[in-house]
Image (cartoon, helix red, strand yellow):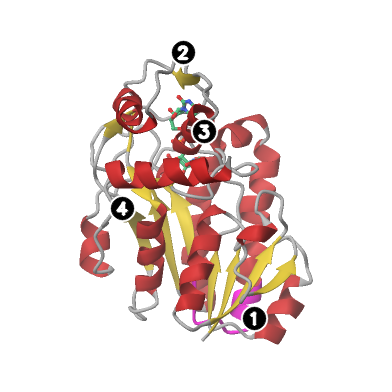
Amino acid sequence: MNICVTGGAGFIGSHLVDKLIEQGHTVLVIDNLSTGCREFVNPKAQFVEMDIRDSELLTVLAKFKPEYVFHEAAQTMVPVSMHDPAFDCDVNLMGLINVLNTCYKINVKKIIMPSSAAVYGDLDTLPLTEAMVGHPSSFYGLTKLTTESYLRLYYEAFGLPYICFRYANVYGPRQGNGGEGGVISIFCERLQKQQDITIFGDGEQTRDFVYVDDVVAANLNALEVPDLVGVINVSTEVSTSLNELVAQFKNIVGHDFVVHYESERAGDIKHSLLSTKKMMAELNYSPKINLTTGLANTYHYFDSKL
Ligand code: UD2
């Protein structure tokens, strides 16, 4: 099949492209390389350097005629959204609308894209299920919640089917170039360089860390269920505090390191744990990689970069 991946030079997008190529698909990557890396783009993929807000997107996709579009290009950083809500909105909503208009004009079968755990905000009842009403505590969470509503309306008003994944905290090789650093990639990079690490807050905040291969597998399964439309968590339903994460790093790293504690970051969620029930029932997928294995793989990837 012809498949377009926006953000295919980025962390998650580039892994997805590799798997799609492995499965024999013809893949077009659209990426403006603002945070993505040209070297991450599979050499067998076609590549167009373009911003998702560019009006020429329609011309490029009309020529390529994708059956499916994976829209991975986004502003992904919670702190960036707090410093510059307008930029976050421009990329994540105006860019989205350009992609959606393009998809329905060229009759794409389905758009598959990420939302985020950030849409839930700090809800008390865990694990978080898709039916819960979110109360985002960051502008990033707000644009992602609004994304879900745009997808629903493009489906109801224009008949464009969609699957929207609420990703938990995704980690793995290739994370951390440009703006896409998460706590695991930041710690890996610093520890590889024998530097200290910093925890924002008391370290008792918890996250649901999901390995990138599991996220990619969930995306691929979405191609197998043509009638499925809606919002689905992609997570492990395993809760890990940052202090526990540091303890796991101590087992892997092989040298002593210093942990500094600083004040909490604006917009941060305290606890994030996402139910896997719907993913298992409707996508027929459950995560395969636990944190110990995923962390070791990721740490050794950063090792090989030095
Ligand atoms: C992640 C996603 C975001 C969104 C959100 C949903 C990443 C990079 N971002 O944001 O896109 O989906 O989840 O809830 O995956 N921290 C430290 N020290 C550091 C860096 C971070 O203590 O050097 C803390 C940070 O304050 C937070 C936790 O680690 O409490 C996780 O931070 P993150 O930036 O990895 O991810 P998060 O949860 O803000």
In the picture of the structure, the residue carrying the numbered disc 2 is 260
- Mark 1 or 2 closer to N-term? 1
Identity, as a three-letter code, of the amino acid under mark 4: Glu
| Left or right: residue 234 compared with residue 116 | left
Q: Which one is earlier in the sequence, the residue at label 4 or at label 2? A: 4
Q: CA distance from mark 4 to mark 2?
A: 35 Å
Q: Quadrant of residue 46?
A: bottom right
Residue corresponding to mark 4? 130
Label disc, if present, on residue 105 of the rendered structure: 1
Asked if ligand 1 lies within 8 A of label 4, the reply is: no
Q: Is residue 104 left or right of residue 184?
A: right
Image side of residue 105 versus residue 253, left or right? right
Q: Is 257 in front, or is 263?
A: 257
Q: Residue at x 51, y 49 (%)?
A: 144
Front tag of 4 and 2: 2
> In what element is the residue under mark 1?
helix
**Segment colored magenta:** 102-112
Q: Are marks 3 and 1 in contact (CB under 8 Å)?
A: no
Q: Which mark is residue 186?
A: 3
> Residue 268 placed where, x, y %?
46, 28
* Residue pictured at 32% horizontal, 50% vertical: 235
For the residue labelled by badge 4, is the local secondary structure a helix, a strand or a loop? loop
Asked if the beta carbon under badge 3 is closer than 8 A to the nearest atom of ligand 1, the reply is yes
* Distance CA(mark 1)–CA(mark 2): 52 Å
Q: Residue at x 32, y 41 (%)?
A: 208
